[in-house]
Amino acid sequence: MRALLAALIATLAAAPAAADEASGTWTGSVELRANYYWETSTRVVAPEVRARLVTPDGVQIDGGYLIDAITSASIAAGVQEDIRFTEVRNQGSLGASREFDLGEMQLRLGVLGGLSHEPDYFASRLTTFSTLSLNQRSTVISGAFTYIHDNVGSVLRGGMPRTDDMGRDLSDRGRQGQLEGVTASLSLNQVLSPVTTFVAGYQLVHNWGYLQNPYRRARVSGGLVPEEHPDQRTRHTLWGRLAHFFPETRTAVHLMYRAYIDDWDVSALNPEVRIYQLLGDSVLVRLRYRYHDQVDSFFFRTEYTGTEDFVTADPKMSNFFSHLFGVQLRVGLDFLGRTPLSFLERAWVDLSFNYWHQTSTFGDAILAQAGLRAPF
Amino acid sequence: MRVVSLLCLSAALLGGCVSVAPYEREYLANPAMNVELEEGEGEFQAHVFDSREGATGGTGSTGGGCGCN
């Protein structure tokens, strides 16, 4: 470990070359994306922009901005009757990383911060991450640590906006609590052959503080009372992905799996398969199927007697399963090479549609996305 | 270093610490195998899954916002 640290310090001091230092050019990409989510009581429209910039000396800067407009009554928000509202969330993130050449291996170190604001919720997070590449990048070990700090508030919904003489929003009920958490993750990505890769990882999440939803009401002895969840939660996730490419048919198959368990006794399994088929040089079709099956938390009931320590109305705490079917079309824009839009000839667009059948009270949903990614 | 060694050992068990040279990675660079191209769409999907399922993780998603707790 000392040798590694010494090498790291020497590398930082020397600031060796990376990326496109030889040519002195800046590279990167810009991605525009439109996200749409629909279910019986909720619509979400979320446009976003992402950008990546790599400096000539190898520093990578990533930034993103997303607006999330949620319309209509949401079961997640705990609304007990059909009160229509629209809430806007703004989210931004900014990060930087740099790869250092340590001889036979490469080490990337980075930091990423993010803020999310909506009228009743303010979230902040800070992530540090590192990636160690070995065996000519055939083996990649990644680790990350994240701290989150959220302020959970509450506003009156459904009525006309009202302010006092000072311009203060009278619907604002103020802060209800504070949620904090740390996430640690470790993953291993291994190239198994010129056509096969495998990645596996583990993630640990520990949250504490205000872990219930201020709007939801649980049924207790025939009445409705605010949710009361435990004030700590520890969550474990194991996941993996095996990808294989069949050159003869230009087909790729990705098999994915996730196993989850936490100390609220929620456990879940998520197998998923994705099949990719190249058509010509510039068209890629992806089909996917994802299954989710989970066991309810130890305190989930549809009706409480009033003697319980914890009560919930959260559908996410219930026993349910879901099937997700999706299709995506990805088209390269290389045909623009001889047009005035030739600056987009290395870009691609993608369109995806997913139908999600859920047996939870959220009901069936549609998730659709469209994106344009242009490298430069 | 022990952790790195342990992970290397795991990698060795998986693929014999396979080292595939860059010039052999034509197929791995194919868009059908490049999962980095899905990061943009994946992050929003992970946020949706986090807000509708009791499980989380495995996708790099982070918490916060959207009444997801």
Image (tube, grey):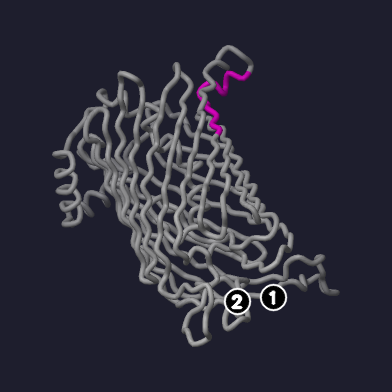
Amino acid type assigned to the residue bearing label 2 in the image: Gln
Task: Tell me where residue A359 appears, x and y as whole percent.
Answer: 50, 56
Is A279 situated left or right of A117 in this image?
left
Chain of the residue displaying label 2: A
* Residue A320 visible in this rendered orientation of the protein: yes
Residue in the foreground of this view, choosing between A255 and A160: A255
Is B62 situated left or right of A226 in this image?
left
Task: Tell me where residue A156 appears, x and y as whole percent.
Answer: 72, 71
As displayed, is residue A212 above or below residue A333? below
Mark 2 to mark 1: distance in Å? 8 Å
As displayed, is residue A230 above or below residue A293? below
Q: Give the range drawn in magenta.
A: A341-351
Q: Mark 2 points at which residue?
A: A176
Is A130 situated left or right of A77 in this image?
left
Q: What element carries label 2?
A: strand
Is residue A119 one of those drawn in magenta? no
As displayed, is residue A197 above or below residue A90? above
Chain of the residue displaying label 1: A
Task: Tell me where residue A280 appears, x and y as whole percent.
Answer: 45, 16
Is residue A347 one of those drawn in magenta? yes
As displayed, is residue B19 above or below residue B41? above
The crowding category of the residue bearing disc 2, from other C-alpha atoms within 10 Å (few below 14, some 14 to 19, many at least 20), is: some
